Image (cartoon, rainbow, N blue to C red):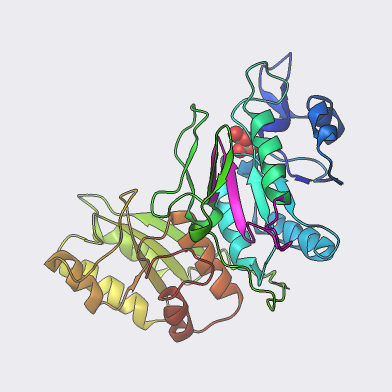
Amino acid sequence: MIYTGGTIGMMKNSETGALENFNFEKLLEYIPEIKEFNLNIHTIAFAPPIDSSDISPDSWCELVKIIYSNYKQYDGFVILHGTDTMAFTASALSFMLEGLMKPVILTGSQLPIGALRTDGKENLLTAIEIAAAKNDDGTPIVPEVCIFFHEKLMRGNRTTKVSAENFDAFKSNNYPLLAHSGIELQFFKNNIRAYNPDAVLTPHYKMDPNIVIFSLFPGIQPCTIEKILKEKDIKGVIFRTFGSGNAPQKEWLVDALTNASKSGKIIVNITQCSTGSVRMDLYETGQQLLKSNIISGYDSTVEASLTKLMFLLGEGRNPNEIRHYMNSSIAGEVTI
Ligand code: ASP
């Protein structure tokens, strides 16, 4: 169990009223039930624990290092993480842990573990149960990176935080659930990545953060887009368009995108809608984007397309290779 921080392990500062992290031992005091599992659970904590708004590619590397160096000794990993950026971390890990064949389950909570009505207890206990779950032949039931939150087990790189107030805080809009925890813990095995006994875990540590997420809006001005696309340090843009991947029919926009693609920048078209996929061939307003050579992100989430691009750029892939990998599923992040 790896504790990174987040609300699950926070307490109210009596002077400021703000929630602050407390240490892991204290967190465990609130869940004596953990001992009742007949499992050997070892814990590692980030020092100091961090609010997930402070998570960065360096934190992802630290997680990859911990998992890689402990991979053989353990059947599965549970990561306690703040909810705010949990979907980014889950997406990043799904790319950085190539060949993963053991469960890596991220969870957290909306209320601190010390709060009477906390959702942290049930989230943590079920995440542990899932990380330890095996098929009859001894293989793990869930050999992939997931988020477990409020009764739902979701593929990590398909998940988005959708609520800042409900216990049901995450959604996997374009991919079905991997498991549901009610009276029984029910796995939907057809939706879970197949176990491959020959896969070898290969860790990756380089993520290139020189990317922008840009959302289109009616009234967008040429200078805004051009400033971003001409910035030399920016290597990629996650371009959030309307509906099925559409943009205003403006010559300056198509020109700016075409020139940026020609200069080697990677522009990925994803939709602002929470469900559905980009289909640039459907409308004239999308077809013009096809001509400007931008890449479809299909039905991927912002979190998955951003971290996939960080990963591919970090690996030093050239624009053609990136186009190829963006048009395929590396870790189940996209439906093609
Ligand atoms: N700010 C917290 C975090 O993401 C919120 C949470 O854990 O729910 O670290």
Q: Is residue 20 left or right of residue 165?
A: right
Q: Is residue 57 above or below residue 126?
A: below
The answer to which quarter of the image holds residue 175 is bottom left
- Is residue 89 among the parts visible in the rendering? no
- Say whether residue 137 is magenta: yes
- Is residue 8 among the parts visible in the rendering? yes
Q: In the rendered structure, which segment of residues is drawn in magenta?
A: 133-154
The answer to which quarter of the image holds residue 229 is bottom left
Q: Residue at x 30, y 55 (%)?
A: 276
User: What secondary structure do most residues of the magenta stretch adopt?
Assistant: loop
Q: Nearer the viewer, residue 100 or 97?
A: 100
Q: Position of residue 228 (x, y in %)?
A: 39, 63
Q: Is residue 201 left or right of residue 86?
A: right
Q: Position of residue 108 (x, y in %)?
A: 64, 37
Q: Position of residue 188 (x, y in %)?
A: 51, 52
Q: Nearer the viewer, residue 135 or 199?
A: 135
- Ligand 1 position by quadrant: top right
Q: Residue at x 87, y 46 (%)?
A: 40
- Say whether residue 27 is magenta: no
The answer to which quarter of the image holds residue 39 is top right
Q: Residue at x 79, y 24 (%)?
A: 30
Q: Is residue 274 above or below residue 258?
A: above
